[in-house]
Image: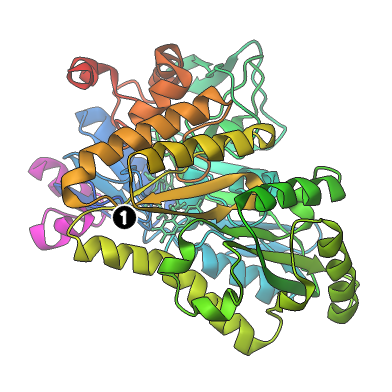
Amino acid sequence: MTVLCTLLNELGINATMDGDITKGYDRDSSNMEGRAELVCRPKNEIETAMTLAVFHQSRHPLTVVAGKTNLTGSATPNGGGVLSMEKLKSPSPILNLDTHTICSPVGIYLEEMRKEVLLQSQNMLHYPVDPTSRNEAMVGGTISCNASGFVPGPQGATRYWTEGLEIITPQGCKITAKRNEHISENGVFFLQFPEGEKTLPIPTYPRPEIKNASGVFSNDSGVLDFVDLIVGSEGIFGIVTSVTFKVKPKPKDFLELFFTLPGEKQAVDFHQYLSQYWGGDLSNVSALEYFGYNCQNYMDNRNYLFEDDNEVGIYLQIPLFNEEIEAAAEKYLIILEKSCCGIQEDRILSLNNPENWNRFFESRHSIPANALEKTRQMDTWSILTDTIVPPENFGEFLNSAHSILRDENMEYLLFGHLGDCHLHFHMIPSKSRQKEAIVLYDKIVEESARLGGVYSAEHGTGKRKRPDFLKCYGEDAAEQIRRCKEAFDPNNILNKGNVVYPSDHLELADG
Ligand SMILES: Cc1cc2nc3c(=O)[nH]c(=O)nc-3n(C[C@H](O)[C@H](O)[C@H](O)COP(=O)(O)OP(=O)(O)OC[C@H]3O[C@@H](n4cnc5c(N)ncnc54)[C@H](O)[C@@H]3O)c2cc1C
């Protein structure tokens, strides 16, 4: 490693083995244990390519690190080098007002890019993907994880907006790909490398068509856009150095409502009702968020939001393009009333004034914060599911998951993205019951797979959820990903161990 560090510095690339610096890269937000021996911070595409080529030639593992906000250990290094994206900030984002696209570097925070879209379009256009972590996650991290936000349906996730990418492969070669220009045929791409043409077999395991961040994108007919192969691949094929995103006209305003319902059954019915109202396309609303079982006990301002005995609550946000707020509010009061889901008209809270909004925001924010605080006080850790199932199995899945947890008397709360049937069961086991909680988590993941869903709708697989990938898609699917990776990365150096166990560690993993 010392020789590598010297070589990189001789090439003019910022690289260090100073322990005070490297230890800052040992862990990401997953809090999994890791170890970085060397950290390099290239500041442009050429330096990125040279760094990759040096690691490829020397066969040392290299982990790509951006905002470190992933919850799965995908940016946790297991020894070797770290390539930090933090200096890849230029050229600055440029918005094209004619094509409604923005070309962005990957080492800036997502919120910075979103603000640029507003600024350069004078508030006419926006980039609607709004993960909660958008102030800390970098653009490149959101591409690699296919991050998503509040908007239900495909429009809520990064993939939908990604028009083009530039990536550097582990051998240091650059690939430029635009959407619709490179489509695989019969399950393969042909890549031109300096040493000759390579066949790239794409993964073909069947993939449910729901919000999905589990594993690499695949297509069982063997037809895949190259851009889709890269988005959500957790950095195992190459490093994204630049991106072009579509953007869209920004709504003039939003109608913001909070209301309560008697229980979860009514919330599931309401999801179905609203989905039918919009002809199955819930992307017409920009948020449909759920505050379910036990949330009230972890919430500040509880009495403000829940004045009655109702158990659960919903936050609904509607984008307004041509309508005034008052007219939209009247229209939506009627729509909510007609749902027959027990919504009381006089208890619907408008969040369109700053005081109400701030109190609501505080309450929403306080739920995970208070849950985490309890976890700390109990000297334990939380376990959060990220499962999703198709809408037709949503009710059955929720009933099963509640039974799994209640039968064992496990402390938990439930909240999340109702619009996508994607709720998080947040378990808070006492220290002595941590192992039991993992067993319960596994049972819930198995149940989601049985009902046609997946273990991860937004957080991805990383290193932590590799067993879940195997449970959901099987060993053959893992092997397909390994074969695809091998074509990009024959020495298996880049983000080794993300999504699937690397082939040279299979015995270890089995043991
Ligand atoms: C409080 C909190 C809230 C969150 N909320 C959401 C949410 O609402 N929605 C959601 O989807 N996720 C959410 N997440 C998860 C996380 O923020 C996202 O997965 C995010 O996209 C990770 O981006 P990052 O820059 O932090 O990447 P990192 O964590 O640094 O890396 C994540 C993966 O991307 C790879 N990578 C990063 N940059 C590149 C690149 N340029 N080229 C190739 N590979 C690269 C890394 O190697 C790693 O595999 C949340 C996390 C936290 C801690």
Specify start and end residues of the magenta stretch as a single range: 1-26
Predominant SS along the magenta part = helix
Crowding near the residue tagged with mark 1, few <14, some 14–19, many ≥20 C-alpha atoms within 10 Å: some
* Nearer-the-camera pick, 398 or 149: 398
The x and y percentages for residue 34 are 18, 45
Question: How are the colours assigned in the image?
Answer: rainbow
Q: Is residue 367 above or below residue 285?
A: below
* Nearer-the-camera pick, 82 or 278: 278
* Nearer-the-camera pick, 481 or 392: 392
Is 347 magenta? The answer is: no
State yes or no: Cβ of the residue under disc 1 lies below 8 Å from any atom of ligand 1. yes
Q: Residue beneath label 1, please?
A: 29
**Quarter of the image that includes the C terminus:** top left
Please report the residue visible at 57 percent of the width from the left and 24 percent of the height from the top.
218
* Nearer-the-camera pick, 468 or 272: 272
Q: Is residue 340 above or below residue 57?
A: below
The x and y percentages for residue 117 are 66, 68
Which of the 4 image quarters holds residue 372? bottom left
